[in-house]
Amino acid sequence: IDIPHKQVKKICCIGAGYVGGPTCAVIAYKCPHITVTIVDLNQARIDAWNSDDLPIYEPGLDEVVKAVRGKNLFFSTDVDTAIKEADLIFVSVNTPTKKSGVGKGFAADLGYVESATRHIAKVAESDKIVVEKSTVPCRTAQSMRKILDSNGKPGARFDILSNPEFLAEGTAIRDLFAPDRVLIGSLDTVNGRAAAASLADVYGNWVPRKQVITMNLWSSELSKLAANALLAQRISSINALSAICEATGADVDEVSYAVGLDSRIGPKFLKASVGFGGSCFQKDILNLVYLSESLHLPDVAEYWRQVVEMNESQKRRFTQHIISSLFNTLTGKRLAVLGFAFKKDTGDTRESAAITLIKYFRQEQAKIAIYDPKVEESQIWYDLAEPGVVDDVTALKKQVTIASSAYEAAEGADAVVICTEWDEFRDTKLDYEKIYATMNKPAFIFDGRLILNQKKLEKIGFKVECIGRSRLE
Ligand code: NAD
């Protein structure tokens, strides 16, 4: 970008989570001349980043972190020093959903963004470029600007940029190394454009220039919500079609293959499943719903709300299907739940479909054995416990066990339920004959991710039920 601007030498990232950690580790890896310090208030998380056992699992992350940690990448809880020393500060804190007392539904909880921004204003002694990395409702940068301008020290001037992150968990490092695009939103002022140019230079160290796109601040903020809303909408659309497939004899894999060949539609994100999960899709759509409501656009709000509703309905429908197949009752039956993470190649369980399904199975008095290759046992107990219900953990442990392999989970089970599409659950990897031998008969498999070869498993003797595939003869 052809205007005079400063070269960034020191970066601070506030928030050492799924986004801040990998994103800034990759910046340090690709930019040896820049010192990157990632800070967090959570001491345990920072200790883990400084250890051999990183706090999050992402393929390739270990190698990147270990190559540069202690050289130009540092993890610390000393937020003040990192802010003071940096020329550019990423705000990459969590922006969870909160139930809104005033609106009709949910809103983004911007408390963490606000307190990180106030922290910057309080300690910064020189000019800073402050970058929204968190996903935020449109016009959040305006609130940050007001906080910075009214609380900052006299010698410090702040420029705000929006630089939303498009990485997907499970492929974060690959996505960061070769992003489809990097978006930088700025105010259309000389200072705003210069700040954008400084950040563009950082990415320019490895991302081709034509993929680093600058635009107005509000477009950039909204683009992130729009991208997630459209991705989630595709999943809800194919899931809505999967229900029609089951009732008519069509096969959803064939339908998505056929429609995906249309170059206007394309094949990606058209896999039917038990529903999307993860910390972002639902949250970002609810964000858009709230934004639409506050802009007095009720029809628009309702339109996006239906994407989330369809996702919930898919989980209920899948559960109903399981109950009716197992002779209309789950009482005392044993279900082996394979997969607890919200998708493969991550240990993240936020909004995982498995959590909702297991809640339904428990309500139906089933016994459940869970196996996931990456999710920690303590995380599973945490996710399944009803907050505030003291006795629940005892009741929970009577109904639920955690297995150390798929084989162990399936022993004595009436049904295997595939909740996460881990490669190791495929029929080319797992010995389903061995599983069949130890199960109650008839032995069912419910494939919530369409990863299994139905015919092959039926030959073994299983009764196989798949999302979006008809039970009609
Ligand atoms: P996370 O919860 O894993 O990490 C956020 C971290 O910020 C936490 O460790 C928390 O302790 C820390 N934090 C909060 N307030 C702080 C403060 N004032 N000072 C220092 N540290 C503070 O969240 P995440 O998954 O990394 O997501 C961060 C943001 O990125 C969210 O807005 C999310 O919507 C967005 N995002 C997430 C993904 C994803 O795949 N997870 C992808 C794109 C964008």
Image (cartoon, rainbow, N blue to C red):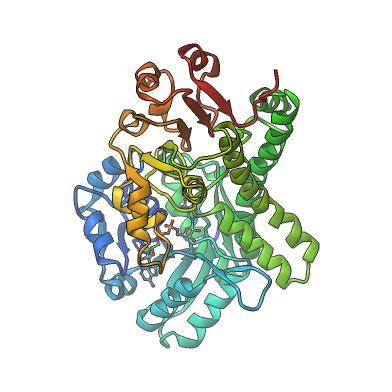
Q: Is residue 133 left or right of residue 10?
A: right
Along the viewing direction, whichever of 134 and 99 lies nearer the viewer: 99
Q: Position of residue 109 (x, y in %)?
A: 52, 70
Figure quadrant, ligand 1: bottom left
Q: Quadrant of the N terminus?
A: bottom right
Furthest-top residue in view? 459
Q: Quadrant of residue 387?
A: bottom left
Q: In the image, what residue occupies the spot 34% across and 29% down?
A: 411
Q: Is residue 123 left or right of residue 249?
A: left
From the viewer's side, name the closer residue of 127 and 246: 246
Could you tell me which quadrant the C terminus lies in? top right
- Name the residue rendered at 40%, 53% in the picture: 18
Residue 125 horizontal side relative to residue 227, left or right: left
**Rendered residue at 53%/22% (across/down):** 463
Q: Estimate the x, y position of residue 33 in percent, counting from the top left.
A: 30, 53
**Quarter-of-image position of residue 90:** bottom left
Q: Position of residue 445 (x, y in %)?
A: 49, 27
User: 28 or 311: which is nearer to us?
Assistant: 311
Q: Is residue 215 visible?
A: no
- In the depicted structure, whether residue 315 falls above or below residue 133: above
Label tally: 0
- In the displayed structure, 261 sits above or below 57; it is above
Q: Is residue 82 left or right of residue 184?
A: left
- Residue at x 68% of width, y 63% of height: 289
38 shown above or below 259: below
Looking at the picture, tell me which residue is in the foreground, 204 or 419: 419
- Residue 28 location, x and y as percent? 32, 51
For the question of whether residue 468 can be seen, the reply is yes
